[in-house]
Image: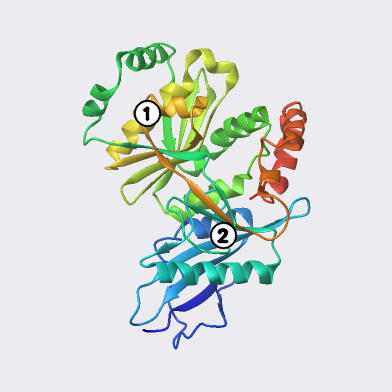
Amino acid sequence: MPETTVEIIDLCHGTLMESPTASWDNPSHPRLNGHASPWADAVCAGLDYKSFILRCGSPQAPRGSLPLALVSGPIFGKFLVSLPYVNTGGVEAQTPEVATALVDTACNLADELNVRYLELRHEVPVDHPKLNHERTDKFHMRLELPDTDAELDKTFKSKLRSQIKKCGTYNHTTSWGGLELLPDFYRVFATNMRDLGTPVFSKKLFKSIVNSFNGEAEFCVIHNKGTAVAAALLVHSHGTTEVPSASSLRTWNRTGPNMWMYRQLLERAIAKKSHTFDFGRSTMSSSTYKFKKQWGATAHPAVWQYYVREGNVEQMRPESQTNQRLIKIWQKLPLCMTNVMGPPIVRGIP
């Protein structure tokens, strides 16, 4: 049987590292493959992470890939994640042998970098002895789209159509665009993150995503009386439209800007010829789960697997008692303060 080979490409510095069992004769392979590009570029540039792509194969054997980012900060320590911010990463492999080789190399890299744990954001679990912890509490909410918006509208229940119609009476306006809408998007996003008690990502990340996707990423901003009241980032790629970030202002909740915005997002996805709309992850029966389900989205399991070397994965979750106390403190801070303090903190959270 041909030897399974592994190469580790440092995406931020353009260097090639080889695992002890690697045997590529020619290291001049494409810098990114379809699995990692352009998310690896966006994460690396936008969050200043050291990022890698593990590529596996030989001239005779199937290949696979695994994008990784080194998440590091002064508060929480170091983590190796596939991929931060992105809902699904992890191993992509044509055979179990290739998957095993990729995880072997990722675990070795985790040891070498001395991280607390390796986090692989899978949907289909990989059987590997070193993956010693698993999370299955989240579900991807996805909607299969028809060919036309009129067909989609017919699938909505009467209650949903009535809610959308009511939102339309508040004279919301919709804007689509690129980086010129980043300030409005970020103002809404940062305010909502503060209200949730969550440190906000920097503007640099969203700028990097728009630039990396080269026309396939855009902002949607809902205005009312000249104020941005809801906003979302959309990425249209390979027949799927996903919404990695979306927010609305609580002070405008009675006018339903979030409901109105998602109706525009779905219409936009169909106009972009997408066959699937990805609402992102939610916990079963949560308010966000119910919101997404009312549009017709169905739940798909998320299986996050870990190679834990130090500490406890649960310590990093918002539900922990320590983090709940911090969330309550954060919610009371001025927005100008959270906008400055948030980005350096959140880039160190896996």
Query: What mark, if any, has residue 131 been given in the picture?
Result: 2
Compare residues 71 and 263 and report the one nearer the observer: 71
At mark 2, the secondary structure is loop
Q: What residue do we see at 46% from left, 54% from top?
A: 125
* Mark 1 crowdedness (10 Å alpha carbons): few <14, some 14-19, many ≥20: some
Do tag 1 and tag 2 residues touch (Cβ < 8 Å)?
no
Q: Nearer the viewer, residue 205 or 305?
A: 305
Taking the view exactly as shown, the residue that stands out farthest to the bottom is 25
Q: In the image, residue 335 lies at what x, y percent?
A: 71, 30
Q: Which mark is residue 317?
A: none
Give amino acid for label 1.
Answer: Gln
Q: Amino acid at mark 2?
A: Leu
Residue linked to disc 1:
264
Q: Residue at x 46, y 59 (%)?
A: 126
Mark 1 element type = helix
Residue 340 pos. (x, y %): 73, 41
Using the rendered view, name the quadrant where residue 308 is placed: bottom right
Q: Give the spatial CA distance, label 1 vs label 2.
A: 41 Å
Horizontal side of residue 132 vs 126, given as left or right: right
Q: Earlier in the sequence, mark 1 or mark 2?
A: 2
Q: Quadrant of the N terminus?
A: bottom left
> Which residue occupies 28% across, 37% down?
271
- Comparing labels 1 and 2, the label whose residue is closer to the camera: 2
